[in-house]
Amino acid sequence: MSSITERMQQANLTKKERTIIEKITRDIEKTAFLNGIGLAERYDVSATFITRLIQKLGYEKFADFKKELRDRYQRMTFPKDMYRHFLEGGGGNIVKASITQDVQNISNMETLLDKKVLNKVVSAIEKSDTVYMVAMFGSEVAVDALFYYLGRLGMKRRKVKGVGLSKKIEFTNIGKDDVLVAFSSQRIVKEVVAAAEYARKQGAKTVAITDNATNPLACACDYTLLSPVKGVAIDYTNAANIAMINVIVNCLAERDPEKVQAQLEEDERFWKNKDIFCM
């Protein structure tokens, strides 16, 4: 079966059609999860235009085209392919590229931040009995960070990580008084999505921290906070995820100063008694 690129080369497309399909493939991280109407709205064309374009590319139905997009997207999510792309680009100043990309991700996170959604997420966490956190692979870093900071605020929390987490979450008592926060840099990991879906069925509020509002995880959750994770060489980066965690935790700390102050004073007494400091 021909790839999208091969079909583009062989099809007799108009200039506008070629421009649109090039945009669709270029923006694969967004377009892989859109339906025909979504693609039409994104590129300001009619649904009929998209249907005709897909047919001219040789696809019998939209589902075949969408599968090709998702397969193409999935190949991009593997570190091996990311690294190969990096090498093909000539490498360059890796130190500058890494720092520049992290700064760009955090800047984009700030631009994309919906403060109304943020406020709802913070309120849900504040009122919750227990905050559950789920992630796999590189995204587990974010779970560890959020787990630590919520502990500093004296909040009940539980982290569920790694292979098998979708089953592990079923053996918890997660329910209507709880919140589940799910991180997924790859956006399409089945177990993370399944955990969010299960938590939602149990009545818990669910939050996706991911970099796309239309991916499977975002669609499975009540709220989505966008956090770009574009990396440079071997994997995604958690710089924006950590920044998002800082925003959430600082918002929580601002809401109840007396409680937070008391918790921090208790922590200080505890650690001083443990004699863990050099001075």
Image (spheres, rainbow, N blue to C red):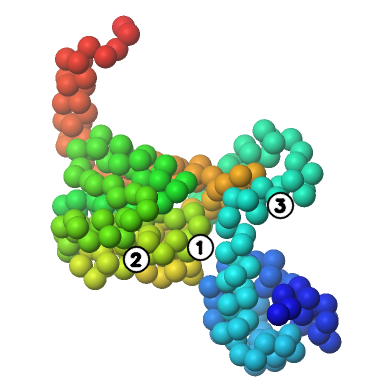
What is the spatial separation of the Cα atoms under label 1 and label 3, in whole angstroms? 21 Å
* Residue depicted at 47% across the width and 64% down the height: 188
Q: Residue at x 69, y 36 (%)?
A: 94
Residue placed under numbered mark 2 in the picture: 194
Could you say which disc has been placed on residue 85 in the image?
3
User: Tag 1: Cα neighbours inside 10 Å, few (<14), some, or many (≥20)?
Assistant: many
Q: Please name whichever residue, 167 or 46, is drawn nearer the observer in this view of the structure.
A: 167
Q: Is residue 35 visible?
A: yes
Q: Is residue 150 above or below residue 60?
A: above
Above/below status of 273 relative to 239: above
The disc, 3 or 2, on the residue closer to the chain's N-terminal end is 3
How many numbered discs?
A: 3
Percent of width and height locating residue 31: 59, 72
Do residues under tags 1 and 3 come within 8 Å of each other at their CB atoms?
no
Q: Disc 1 vs disc 3: which is toward the camera? A: 3
Q: Secondary structure at mark 2?
A: helix
Answer whether residue 20 is visible to the viewer in this image: no
Residue 221 lies in quadrant: bottom left
Cβ atoms under marks 3 and 2 closer than 8 Å = no
Q: Quadrant of the N terminus?
A: bottom right
Residue 247 in the figure: left or right of residue 232:
left
